[in-house]
Amino acid sequence: MVSGSDIVVETKNLTKIYRDFWGRQKVRALKALDLQIKRGEVFGLLGPNGSGKTTTIKLLLGLLFPTSGEIQILGKSASDVTKNERIGYLPEESYLYRFLNAEETLDFYGRLFNMSGVVRRQRVAQLINMVGLDAARKRQLREYSKGMTRRIGLAQALINDPDLILLDEPTSGLDPIGTKNMKDLIIELRNQGKTVIMSSHLLADVQDVCDRVGILYQGELKELGRVDELLQISTQTEIRAEGLSDGARKKIEQIIQEDGAALNFSGHPTTTLEELFLNIIAESEARPGRRVRGGAKE
Amino acid sequence: MIIEKPVPSLWEFLFVPSEYPISFGGLWIVVILALAFLTALAGLLFSILHAGSFGKGITGFGSNTVRTFADLFYLAPSRVWAIARLAVKESLRRRVLFLCVVFMLFLMFAGWFMNADRIDPAKQYLTFVLSMSTYLILLLAVFLSAFSLPNEIKSKTIFTIVTKPVRSSEIVLGRIIGFTIVGTAILVFMSLASYAFVSFSLQHEHVLTMEDLRPYEGSSPKILDSGATLLMVGSTRQKNNHRHGVEVYDDGTVLVEDVNNHAHDVTVISDILKSTGKISTDETGGLRFKVLPSREQLQARVPLYARSLVFRDTSGTDQAKGIDVGHEWQYRYYIGNFDKSSNDAGIFNFTGVTEKKFSDGLPVEMTLGVFRTYKGTIDKPVQASIAVRNPRNGLHAEVQIFHTEEYITKSLFIPRKISNVSADVVQRKSGGLETPSVIDPSLSTKRDFDLFEDFVADGEIELWIRCIDNQQFVGVSQFDVYLHEADASVFVNFFKGYYGIWQQMFLLLSFGVLFSTFLGGPVSMVAASGIMIAGFCKELMVQLAVRENLGGGPLESFMRMLKQSNLMEEMQKGMTASFVTSADYVSAFFLMMISRVIPPLSDYAYYKTALVAGFDIPANWIFVHSVTTFGYVLPIFFIAYIILSNREVAK
């Protein structure tokens, strides 16, 4: 755990400018980022492609060196290798050795943490089970599907039971079930008291799991705050009810009009496509061989 | 074997200055300090430029330096081993073992084109397998090491490595170790395959039947120590361009002459011999012979070189140098002819000549140079003589007159018992002093002598080589004449030879890894290959740097080309000439600096020379070269580590 402080990551005036060989400025990837991330929160970095999300994560990890500004991560400098003892990192795409199989991959990364043989074997078995790759544990990664690669990548990031986990586009390339599992896992990690930093351009993902988000655009931090606060529309009120009769609904609409407020919408809510898809899958698994009709549960 | 310098011991190599005013150990420290200074300067400049202010730059540089050194102490063997294992797996996946197949194919095809019909077939086969192994393994070393890290950076797998608690030092070291393991495995395979190939190719049998033999008709019967009497003489049928003389004795013993460094075991098949244990002259008709495959044809001679060589001039005075017959070979001098009026001789002083080592006598081997002032009968060799002298009392006796053979190792044997020779006492003169100062005239007699009792004093003996043909010259250097002390294991020597190749491989792949920390794959491969070529041409580079060559430096040579003036012509004096000369001094200075740090790959080629020539590779070479190799790899590792740890891998 972080000693003496609840701040896990802190950046001050963090700036990264990409230069070409002659030192000429090419891109200003990140402009004066000030950020504080507290222990135990899930922080989302949000923004369109090329907004500086990945650059930020790479700077935090020491894969890139800042042009100016400071980074404190787990109380250490980003260039300090020892910080990595307690960090897990899932890169944008799982850059793994395609000639190793799942077990060998995790065993290799375990060795990099100087784990003993016993601990390593135990941890490898546990993680393979957790990400659901038991059946493919002896297959080379070159034969893996995108989703499987992503899962072994995640297992790799968790090999050292890290306190701080950085996930770069964790849901990219995953099917809705994979996305759901990933999101469940992130929430599970938060429940274990771990800090998670994730970047994404998929707004729904961020909304579902993140406590706080920072929105980056063209290298600048545009918005920062708690998700529920940011998304709350304080001038509007939503009422949801189950089994309401049409007569009762009319009465409510009448009351709203009497109150002088404007009625924006009244009717049956639609579900999200994601939810629909997940329900269909769940239904199919429960009763195989039947075509499932209707999406949302009545 | 041609060596020009004595093999230094490890101590001498490290601490005793020889060619330069500083010993190699000292030179190493100077180079390391210079490198450290340059690296620090570059780092400091970069740091100041990067930080934008002087103060910040210095503190940044300071903390970075402290971290760099401190990190070295956290180097964990288990992580290094993990990276090394990965490098091995990666190499195997790149099908490097295919190289073994390629090597076998080369051997197969070579088998068609090479044959054992030469005078010394072992040389040809050894040269081939050693060269082939060297080229293939060095190519592999360069390819593997140069592409690995750039590929990881390109495929971004490096991201998952450096975000673990892995030090850059471990990445560099693990890679070097991993590739070394792969290279070593392949080299071991190559050495075993080569050994089998050479032994198999040289192996042959001869035919020997009764038709090849005739009864022994000497005036006196020849009887062995065992009591067996010589019955028949003759020679085997020809095979591989040679035949062996044989002597058949009446107890079934067959003595076979040594030709091309080998002999064969021959057994007699005869019913009569089986029953009576003797072959009689009448019953030889039914004899059959079984000639076994040749015994070992490869050699690993252990030479005992002379401690010193001095030249005795015509007047009988010792000189450090002999007669110079021109710029033929700098280290070899010539001995003029010896007769009543001249005293010319080359005096080799041997130490460590003990009865235990040479109980039967002294096997002397030599490669002499010959310089003829007149052709004479061209196929008649120049004659020389060899004499022994006791360095203490001056007792001197000529033991043999022999024909010189240029380019071929001549073997002589000075027996333990030297019967019926005239000895005299010969004094040596140097610097006005005579040794021995007082001579004992009673020693000058004609009698039987014992080599160790009469000529060896405290393990010391002098061998005098003289040219006895009028107006001809015999050339010698200190390492041209040696005593064949023992024969080492050929098999072990073969591996020592491959150790020479291993060191070259180890050096080159370290360079490959170094370049790959800051260059792309193809560029680091070219750079490592450049080091390889420069390493093999190191002697030439040094020669150019010390301006020993004719025609001057690059600018002067260029001027000469433009003016079409030849190498010997003096440059026209004037502004241009002095400018050109001084510019060439500057380039020579830089060439000198570069040539000093280029690894001496050509030195490792001595292993091949020794192996091909059939000499045991001395332990001192192995020590000295091993230290040299690691002396290079250590700073390479360090520089590679500094570069990698200060590099943005995600860029």
Image (cartoon, coloured by chain):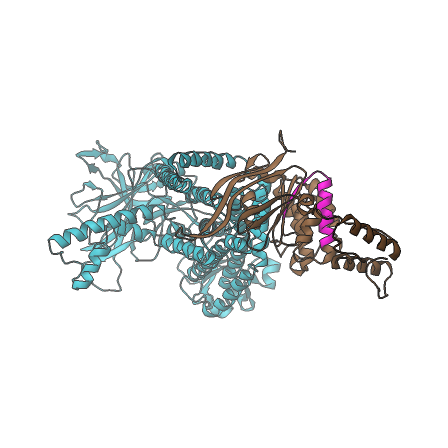
Chain colours: A brown, B cyan
> How many labels sit on residues?
0
Image-based side of B341 in relation to B85, left or right: left
Image-based side of B612 in relation to A239, left or right: left
Name the quadrant containing residue B358. top left
**Could you say where residue A54 lies in the image, as x and y percent from the top left?**
57, 50
A82 in relation to B473, above or below: above
Q: Residue furthest left?
A: B573
Per the picture, the main secondary structure of the magenta-coloured stretch is: helix
**Where are the magenta residues, as a range?**
A179-198
Q: Does residue A239 appear in the picture of this structure? A: no
**Could you say where residue A296 lies in the image, as x and y percent from the top left?**
82, 58
Q: Nearer the viewer, residue B603 or A292?
A: A292
Image-based side of A5 in relation to B561, left or right: right
**Is residue B267 within the magenta segment?**
no
Q: Does residue B325 appear in the picture of this structure? A: yes
Name the quadrant containing residue B564. bottom left
Q: Quadrant of the C terminus of chain A?
A: bottom right
Q: Nearer the viewer, residue B250 or B359?
A: B359
Image-based side of A277 in relation to B60, left or right: right
Q: Residue at x 53, y 61 (%)?
A: B99
Q: Quadrant of the N terminus of chain A?
A: top right
**Is residue A182 within the magenta segment?**
yes
**Could you say where residue B572 lies in the image, as x and y percent from the top left?**
11, 56
B59 in relation to B310, above or below: above
Q: Residue at x 46, y 54 (%)?
A: B223
Q: Nearer the viewer, residue B340 or B64?
A: B64
**Could you say where residue A225 lies in the image, as x and y percent from the top left?**
63, 42
Q: Residue furthest top?
A: A4
Q: Nearer the viewer, residue B399 or B495?
A: B495
